[in-house]
Amino acid sequence: MARRSVLQSVQRAMRIAAALLSSQYAYMLEYRAEIALWALSGVLPLIMLAVWQGSDGAAAAGLTPQGLGRYFLAAFVVRQFSVVWLIHVFEEDALQGKLSPQLLQPLQPLWRYLAAHVAEQATRVPFVALMLASVVVLQPGLLWLPSPGQLLLGILAIQAAFVLRFLLQTLVAMLCFWSERAAALDRLLLIPYLFLSGLVAPLESFPPAVRRIAEYTPFPAMVSFPAKLLAGESVEVGAGFLNIALWCAVLFPLSRLLWRAGIRRYSAMGA
Amino acid sequence: MSAPIVLAEGLSKSFRVADKQPGFSGTLRHLLRRRYRDVEAVRGLNFTIQPGEVVGFLGPNGAGKTTTLKMLSGLIHPSAGRVEVAGCLPQRRQERFLQQITLVMGNRQQLIWDLPPLDSLRVNAAVYGIDPIEAKRRITELADMLELGEELHRPVRKLSLGQRMKAELLAALLHQPAVLFLDEPTLGLDVNAQARVRDFLANYNRRTGATVLLTSHYMGDITALCERVLLIHQGHLFHDGSLDALTSRLAPCREVRLELRQVHPREAFEGFGTIEAQQGHQVRLLIPREQLTQQVGLLLSRFEVVDLEVSDPPIEELIGGLFRQQG
């Protein structure tokens, strides 16, 4: 009996996931031109690649010029598939009352936002492929094919980085129940994210003190770890995934706690 | 009598709102020493609704209707009192409760704007755990009742307001809720679309026995659908009963219009009731309900009457008058 009910719950969850993903994918396709522009706006790692190629920075980062190129190319892919914009839509929905219809359905509203992000990632695939192809045509030396194992681990690490970013943004997004301007906090987080994640420069090129600070934050797990993994650089795979899991274990209960308190406040204010 | 499906006991809600004076000094004061005041939106409401009832919820803007509906649907927590819907405490928003209710707000929508309603309906079917074949059957049945066809395949943004509201109703009713909270479901619709939504709701209530609590600024919605009305004013319940009883309560007199063969002086009508107007052959009198038969009989015997009409003043005017009276 219990097994049957578990099976039914799993089936229902699968149906919800399929329905949410397909509808959100269809929705994102309606905005494919906008998504192409968003994909284009995520070229910071490619710009950094051009900047670093003109300097002797590769040695400072302990990388060969080719390794540095691959790192930034991989960072570009990681950035493209771990983009999270939850704060902005959630804040708008909460402040304009659009959250209310979602609260009346037997589904935690955050699942819809998560599905929208995953669908957006799928919509980005052709644009990112096109941009990667363009870069490789311009600089054939940057082309490399990761082994199937590397590719699989890289994809897993990108998705783990995405989940971590999503949880961090959930935490900040929940603050809109109190501050009504949670998006401003996201802008504040952008600076440490840009520098401590390894997006503008490999962490190895930073002074040791900065590197140590970075190690105590979740940011390196969001770009540096998956990018190195994908680029075939030496990296401690187990420790990297464990680090992400630990951060998720901290952020998940915190975001749930804030959600509950926030929804109580939302309900108290007038929904 | 069966157990009520909706119960409100001493239901109250107050909000704390920040007060800000206009101008630069007001902004500075607001920044440095913010002042708050408590606004009582709903004050001690008591009522019950039996399964299958269609109840109209009336009151002017800001009376507390939407706040009450939100408390009944679990969107906001009451400040005081008790509320129970379908045997559940709404504010807990348990799955058992959410499966049994729906709230349709004329100014809010749940359908995905850029996709055809069918996409949203598919999501709703999955979320409510409705078998795909059963979901298809229900969509066909409700679409028939709502006279929706190819509109379900067109993006929501391309639908007219009336078509969109009907699609919203379809989405809200797919899980066959036992209790419907409808907040201005005909808001902004033209007369024909209003009539179709009303017909649908009456038909849906007959077929499913669902309980409906409806707010509307269009009295046509209330008179067509509701045998019972709750009238709320400044957060208090002013009336709970039939529309006729409300009319009697608000208008102790009935209006009698007479068209006479001959013109008579004003004094001739004194003693029959309050003379509202007299113009040539036309006379309008207000006569207390309990004296109506007797006074109309006297009028007919004393004057040569060409035409006679007895009516209640329009309910909108009565309610409007009450609200103006009470500020």
Image: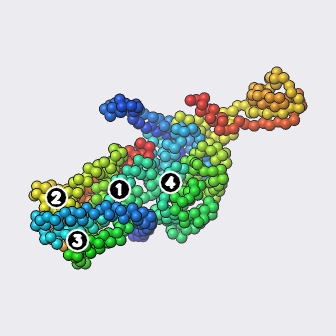
| Helix, strand or loop under label 3 | helix
Residue A125, placed above or below residue A105: below
| Residue lying at 71% horizontally and 36% vertically, measured from the top left | B313
Residue A128, placed above or below residue B63: below
Q: Nearer the viewer, mark 4 or mark 3?
A: 3
| Residue lying at 30% horizontally and 70% vertically, measured from the top left | A131
Residue B324, placed above or below residue A144: above
Q: Nearer the viewer, mark 2 or mark 3?
A: 3
The residue labelled by disc 3 is A230
Residue A29 at x, y = what percent? 43, 66
| Residue lying at 53% horizontally and 34% vertically, measured from the top left | B234
**Disc 1 and disc 4 in contact, CB within 8 angstroms:** no
**Disc 4 and disc 3 in contact, CB within 8 angstroms:** no
Report crowding for label 4: few under 14, some 14 to 19, many 20 or more residues within 10 A (C-alpha).
Answer: many
Q: Is residue B57 in view from this perspective?
A: yes
Report crowding for label 3: few under 14, some 14 to 19, many 20 or more residues within 10 A (C-alpha).
Answer: many
**Picture disc at residue A215:** 2
Along the horizontal axis of the image, is A123 left or right of A74?
A: right
Residue B238 at x, y = what percent? 59, 35
The residue labelled by disc 4 is B109
Disc nearer the start of the sequence (2/3): 2
Q: CA distance from mark 2 to mark 3?
A: 20 Å
Q: CA distance from mark 4 to mark 3?
A: 43 Å
Disc 3: host chain: A
Q: Amino acid at mark 1?
A: Leu
